[in-house]
Amino acid sequence: MSVGFVWVGVGIYVLIVTVVAFLARGGLKSGGLVDYFLWNREMGGVVGALSYAATTYSAFMLVGLAGLTYAGGVGVLGFEMVYFSGLVLVAFFGPRFLLVGKKFGYVTISEMLGDRYGSRAVAVVVALASCVFLIPYSAVQLAGVGYLLEGTTGGAIPFLTGTVIAAVLAVFFSLVAGIRSVAWTDAVQMVIMLVTALVAVLLAVNSLGGFGELFARVSAEHPGSLSVPGNGYFTFGTFLGLTLPWFFFSISNPQVSQRLFMLGSLRNMRRMLLGFLVCGFVYTLVAIVWGYAALVRFPELSSPDLATPSLISSELVPPVVGVVVIVGILAAAISTIESVILTLSAVVARDVYANAGLAGSSDERRQLRVGKLVIPVIAALALLFAGLELDLIAVLAVSSSAGLVVTVPAIIGAFFWRRGTAAGALSSVVLGGMLAAYLEFAGLRLLGVASGVWGFVAAIALYVAVSLVTRAPEGKAADLWAI
């Protein structure tokens, strides 16, 4: 594919999204911390749905999920269906997050937990855990862009150049108007990535003879890809390790759960959920079919993550459509990165800096300045991690979420177990997170089960056991429990 053609497509995308970001800047009202990070708690349902979808469905989908389909087959569909079933948590916890956010003025999830357990340490530890596990998650998105541009241009646009472009754009859009520019650019980017991916996959399938011919060839040439465990990739342990963090994603990942503080009403929350389900289901099917098309056309790729770049640069996809798909994936990755770094900047400012005991650290204006200052720092750390060029984007994305699933017991207990204590929350997050991280980096799979599962089990046991032998807090504990 022509490099110049790719640069023109990227340039047009940047121009359009930049205009949208500056238009969003005009909507800033007070310019304060709540306005910058939470849209003054007035986000609408349609923008919320598109932004939620764009934040969730990143380079993970058309690069990562397509690659996972290429490697493991139809088990990916079950993996994604488990995620959809996990949205019942939003229906259950969303109204509670919305109500306590408005009642107590919470900006971050870690702030809410610190208040609930009567402990600044809880707020700080959960905030730091978010940084530890979400910075690698952001790096996964940067890597997706790097692999895409390098693969589709035959190396003319190096991996590093692609990651730097994505990081710079994410920082820029985050700084323009905070969550307003992020949400509006997310909405535009979600439309771009969904429409372009749908058109591209239909053209690719048509070039292969249609859906019937495609799946007939998959059945004949790769029969293991149409069953579970099929070719052996999706063993029970692997499937459980991938799906457990994904099921709890909506409440464990703060860049997603923080949006529950932003919505203007329960009606908007309902619209957001319904819109997200439609976008997500369509995009999931597109990514899976895309992976199968790559498997039929390029059965001997060195890495599953090359499935999408190989297909885009092949004769199956017209160059114009290929460039638009590249832009769509770039948009998908940037929408996730900007949401993550904005959320992390909020937790650093609101929960780490505010609890540091420094002079003026309780001033919201100073917290906002600190939040803006750390945005490029977070992006730079993600860029360094992306430089490791690790393989299989989908698995790495879930591994990052596996570290955050240890916060789930403390989150559920905040609303449904008055007996939960600060010591229980701290031990579950710290020790559960350390166990998950150790098993992940050591490559250990006890009993064939992934690190996130063991971290989650340990977090539950620690939260309950330690809470039972320590004293429960009063005050906010009763208030949250009653909602």
Image (cartoon, helix red, strand yellow):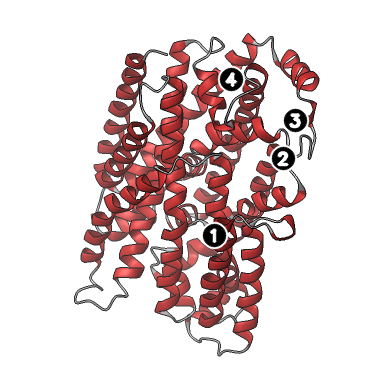
User: What is the CA distance from the residue labelled 4 to the residue labelled 1?
Assistant: 33 Å
Residue located 57% across and 69% down the image:
432
| Pointer 4 local density, CA inside 10 Å: few below 14, some 14–19, many at least 20 | many
Camera-near label (3 vs 2) is 2
Left or right of 475, for residue 7: left
Distance CA(mark 1)–CA(mark 2): 22 Å
Q: Which residue is mark 3?
A: 225
**Labels 2 & 4 near each other (Cβ < 8 A):** no
Q: Considering the numbered disc 4 on the image, is that residue within a helix, a strand or a loop?
A: helix
Q: Is residue 176 visible?
A: yes
Report x, y in % for residue 451.
62, 58
What is the distance, in whole Å, between disc 3 and disc 1 at their CAs?
A: 29 Å
Per the image, the residue denoted by label 2 is 233
Report the amino acid beneath label 4: Val
Rendering coords of residue 302 (x, y %): 58, 28
Q: Which residue is mark 1?
A: 403
Q: Earlier in the sequence, mark 4 or mark 3?
A: 4
Placement of 267 over or under 438, stated as above or below: above
Which sits earlier in the primary sequence, circle 3 or circle 1?
3
Q: How many marks?
A: 4
